[in-house]
Image: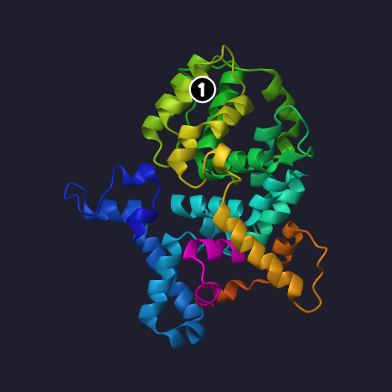
């Protein structure tokens, strides 16, 4: 079950039925032990609520939610960033919950996007949203308005490959400072907490944008870094392709090209192509049902927008009823598991 939920980049080199893959390597790559540990922790913390359904059913529900990518709703940030599957799942949930914003053509600010993200993950960090906004806006101030699709693909790249991009920034800054490729310190990994805050770097942003480095030199350093990096990074062929198309490259222009690259989007496997991003007839039907329910409910405001209605429902949703409550609602709505989960939340 978990194998089918993993990203293509991992399933392509890992199969539990492949005898050449050691057991410990399979367990590490599939993150089975992580999910099993979390399932037990959740059961112990809410045993009075969950044990009434039976322990076997609880575990079946938990791993079903992991497979269907619904398990990240209302969870803490440390949980949603813990595995590549969790990160891709959160991006997909964000898209499905707020796709109507893109369909209506609304432009939102960075802080507005942060508010939407925090409805799904209350402690989602501001720094990560700022980093995604910088990819989209590049030379402009980060308080400018952004389209939903531009922000979504930038957020996907920044969130899914966060540690890799943090390290690439260190490499880029060394090259920008004039260091020789042989003296550039290639980091092993860097967390976003270890980097200087975005606010502290605002004075350096203009320099990052106005200047650039030789793309072949940057490609050489990145390639050497990938040889040692143990976490997820974009396909090397995609990064080479982007760097071969220019004579000089800045950090954010490089990231923007990666964010728009369809092969990278397919590798992550969370979002459809940009041409199909706003096309989802089944989701439209579920949204119509939700709006109809809101409009006929006592005290509802029929003049409220669809997006406003979604926001209000999400504010009222309880993270403590994340598994069995959703399953009950799925049965009552006669919708598919994935579609109902997404539209409800």
Q: Is 308 rendered above or below residue 49?
A: above
Q: In this view, does 11 lie to the left or right of 176?
A: left
| Image mark count | 1
Residue 3, quarter of picture = bottom left
Could you say where residue 59 lies in the image, as x and y percent from the top left? 39, 74
In the rendered view of the protein, which quadrant contains the C terminus? bottom right
Identify residue for label 1: 242
Could you say where residue 183 lies in the image, as x and y percent from the top left? 48, 19
User: Secondary structure under badge 1?
Assistant: helix
Q: Is residue 314 left or right of residue 230?
A: right
Could you say where residue 53 lies in the image, as x and y percent from the top left? 44, 85
In the rendered view of the protein, which quadrant contains the N terminus? bottom left
Residue 252, quarter of picture = top right
Could you say where residue 11 lies in the image, as x and y percent from the top left? 33, 47
Q: Is 91 rendered above or below residue 67?
A: above
Which residue is located at x 55 percent, y 14 percent? 214
Q: In this view, does 240 lie to the left or right of 90?
A: left
Tell me, yes or no, if residue 41 can be seen here.
yes
The residue lying toward the viewer, choosing from 228 and 71, is: 71
- Magenta segment: 327-344
The residue lying toward the viewer, choosing from 33 and 136, is: 136
Q: In this view, does 197 lie to the left or right of 3?
A: right
The dominant secondary structure in magenta is helix
Residue 219 lies in the magenta-colored region = no
Tell me, yes or no, if residue 121 can be seen here.
no
The residue lying toward the viewer, choosing from 184 and 1, is: 1
Which residue is located at x 67 percent, y 17 percent? 211
Residue 339 lies in the magenta-colored region = yes
Which residue is located at x 53 percent, y 39 percent? 273
């Amino acid at each position: 079950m978990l194998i089918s939920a993993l990203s293509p980049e991992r399933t392509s080199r890992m199969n539990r039925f492949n005898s050449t893959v050691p057991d410990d390597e399979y367990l590490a790559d599939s993150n089975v032990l992580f999910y099993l540990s979390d399932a037990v922790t959740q059961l112990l913390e809410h045993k009075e609520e969950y044990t009434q359904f039976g322990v076997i059913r609880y575990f079946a529900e938990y791993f079903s939610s992991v497979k269907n990518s619904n398990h990240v709703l209302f969870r803490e940030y440390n949980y949603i960033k813990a595995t590549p599957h969790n990160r891709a799942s959160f991006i997909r949930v964000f898209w499905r919950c707020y796709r109507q914003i893109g369909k209506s053509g609304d432009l939102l600010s960075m802080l507005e996007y942060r508010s939407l993200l925090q409805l799904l993950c209350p402690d989602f960090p501001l720094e990560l949203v700022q980093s995604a906004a910088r990819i989209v806006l590049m030379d402009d101030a980060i308080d400018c308005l952004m389209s939903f699709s531009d922000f979504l693909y930038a957020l996907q790249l920044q969130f899914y490959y966060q540690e890799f991009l943090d390290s690439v920034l260190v490499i880029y800054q060394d090259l920008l400072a004039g260091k020789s490729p042989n003296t550039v310190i290639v980091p092993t990994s860097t967390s976003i907490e270890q980097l200087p805050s975005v606010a502290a770097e605002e004075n350096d942003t203009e320099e990052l944008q106005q200047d650039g480095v030789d793309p072949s030199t940057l490609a050489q350093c990145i390639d050497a870094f990938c040889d040692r990096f143990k976490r997820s990074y974009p396909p090397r062929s995609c990064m080479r392709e982007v760097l071969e198309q220019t004579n000089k490259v800045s950090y954010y222009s490089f990231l923007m090209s990666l964010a728009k690259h369809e092969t990278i989007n397919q590798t992550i496997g969370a979002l459809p192509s940009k041409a199909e991003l706003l096309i989802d007839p089944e989701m439209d039907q579920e949204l119509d049902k939700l709006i109809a329910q809101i409009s006929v409910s006592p005290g509802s405001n029929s003049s409220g927008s669809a997006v406003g209605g979604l926001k209000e429902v999400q504010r009222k949703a309880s993270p403590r009823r994340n598994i069995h409550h959703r399953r009950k609602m799925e049965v009552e709505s006669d919708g598919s598991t994935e579609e109902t989960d997404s539209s409800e939340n």
